[in-house]
Image: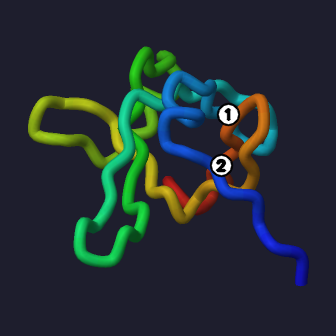
Amino acid sequence: MAEEEKKFSKQLLGKTVVSKTGKKFGEVGDIVFETSSGELIHMVLSNPTSYTEKLELEKTKEGNILIPFSAVIAIGDFLVVAEEDIV
């Protein structure tokens, strides 16, 4: 199995989040992780699109939309998420 390329969180911040079908969700505003294990839990969306607002996704106390990091299927110029894993 090929070794996965490591990415720093600052490389992910500001990247556009899209679904496999190309629907734009917004941008990565922050990343929530478990401090004891380092496990990535959620991405906090900034500049969410109107499409994302309609999905009734989990939100922070401040009303920011959360995308489970487990839904991420590819990271490149965009963060690609599996929409069926978040709705």
> Which numbered dot is residue 42?
none
The amino acid marked with disc number 2 is Val
Q: Give residue 40's quadrant in the image.
A: bottom left
Q: Who's the residue at 28% across and 67% down the image?
A: 34
Q: Nearer the viewer, residue 54 or 23?
A: 23
**Tag 1 residue:** 18
Classify 66 as above or below 37. Answer: above
Dot placed on the residue nearer the N-terminal end, 2 or 1: 1
The image position of residue 2, as x and y in percent, is: 89, 76
Residue 12 at x, y percent in the picture:
56, 36
Residue at point 48% right, 17% down?
A: 50
Question: Which residue is outermost to the left?
Answer: 61
Q: Position of residue 75 (x, y in %)?
A: 72, 45
> Which quadrant: the N terminus?
bottom right
Q: Position of residue 44 (x, y in %)?
A: 36, 37
Residue at figure coordinates x 77%, y 66% from the top left? 4
Q: Measuring 12% from the left and 30% from the top, which residue is drawn there?
A: 62
Q: Which residue in the protein does label 2 denote?
A: 81
Query: Tag 1: Cα neighbours inside 10 Å, few (<14), some, or many (≥20)?
Result: some
What is the C-alpha distance between the residues marked 2 and 1?
Answer: 6 Å
